[in-house]
Image (cartoon, rainbow, N blue to C red):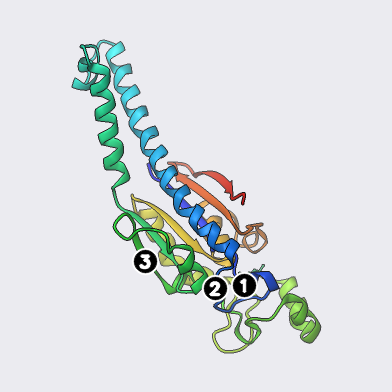
């Protein structure tokens, strides 16, 4: 069992002005989110470890109820001081689970690396990777949707009509389909890996990653509502993933 956390970066100065793309830094509110995120993930990691350890322990007790051999743990629990011993074992298992490898992936863009700045490198394996960068909007980088609508009405309409295939004009401009392709190896790795992780990324990339994990169609992905300061927690199960959504309240 493992946890996959996915979120967008904290609020950036470009978000305040509704500018797309770019490489802006976090606002003070964005930094607050970044602080809270580190504490939140640390807490969730710990309560997940407790949950796992306890459910394993309860299962072991069930075996005993049926007269099967139980682990030393349950036998010792019935002796004097046994309760303390059980708690010690659980605590040490929780500690071990909490110190197991946990990767924090971010894009290479400032707003995303700054959101990960509070994660201690001795507790987390931190990786900044280009393929988590936001969709490249080519010649329209750092424009607002209103400016595009006014200056390039045909382009604006074309994107609204087919957001999935529309590719931004200019050097490096991408479409959702392009981003889906560049994320393929990450998605394969996510499915294969057994450790828990956190991905700090951007609106388009988040939609695609969530879309894959939750089995959404490509056509649905570009229209998913994925606000800032929201953390998605997925627990992959044999058939599909269990999803929880957490909203940061300032
Ligand atoms: O506004 C933030 C942002 O991440 C932009 O950088 C990006 O172009 C946009 O969202 C993507 O959202 P949509 O595909 O809905 O335009």
Is the C-beta separation of discs 1 and 2 under 8 Å? Answer: yes
Q: How many marks?
A: 3
Q: CA distance from mark 2 to mark 3?
A: 19 Å
Q: Position of residue 35 (x, y in %)?
A: 49, 56
Q: Toward which corner of the image does residue 137 lie, by quadrant?
A: bottom right
Could you tell me if residue 10 is visible in this image? no
Q: Position of residue 192 (x, y in %)?
A: 35, 54
Give SS at disc 2: loop
Vertical comparison of 18 with 231: above or below: below
Q: Give me the disc on residue 103.
A: none
Check disc 2: other Cα within 10 Å, few if <14, some if 14-19, many if 20+: many
**Earlier sequence position, callout 2 versus callout 3:** 2
Q: Nearer the viewer, residue 172 or 201?
A: 201
Give SS at disc 3: strand
Q: Label 1: which residue?
A: 13
Could you tell me if residue 211 is visible in this image? yes
Is the C-beta separation of discs 3 and 1 under 8 Å? Answer: no
Q: Label 2: which residue?
A: 25
Residue 22 located left or right of residue 73: right
Q: CA distance from mark 3 to mark 1?
A: 24 Å
Q: Label 3: which residue?
A: 127
Vertical comparison of 219 with 79: above or below: below
């Amino acid at each position: 069992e493992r946890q996959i956390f996915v979120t967008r970066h904290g609020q950036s100065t470009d978000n305040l002005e509704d500018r797309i793309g770019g490489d802006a830094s976090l606002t003070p509110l964005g930094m607050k989110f970044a602080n809270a995120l580190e504490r939140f993930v640390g807490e969730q990691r710990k309560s997940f470890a407790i949950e796992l350890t306890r459910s394993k322990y309860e299962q072991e007790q069930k075996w005993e109820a049926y007269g099967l051999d139980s682990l030393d743990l349950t036998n010792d629990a019935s002796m004097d001081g046994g309760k303390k011993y059980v708690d010690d074992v659980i605590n040490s298992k929780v500690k071990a689970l909490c110190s197991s490898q946990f990767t924090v992936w971010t894009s290479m863009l400032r707003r995303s690396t700054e959101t990960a700045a509070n994660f201690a490198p001795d507790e987390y394996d931190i990786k900044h990777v280009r393929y988590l960068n936001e969709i490249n909007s080519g010649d329209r980088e750092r424009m607002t949707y209103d400016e595009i609508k006014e200056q390039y009405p045909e382009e604006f309409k074309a994107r609204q009509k087919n957001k999935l295939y529309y590719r931004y004009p200019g050097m490096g401009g991408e479409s959702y389909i392009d981003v889906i392709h560049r994320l393929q190896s990450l998605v394969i790795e996510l499915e294969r890996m057994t450790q828990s992780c956190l991905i700090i990324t951007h609106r388009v990339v988040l939609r695609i990653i969530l879309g894959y994990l939750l089995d959404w169609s490509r056509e649905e992905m570009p229209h998913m509502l994925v606000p800032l300061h929201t953390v998605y927690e997925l627990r992959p199960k044999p058939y599909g993933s269990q999803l929880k959504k957490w909203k940061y309240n300032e």
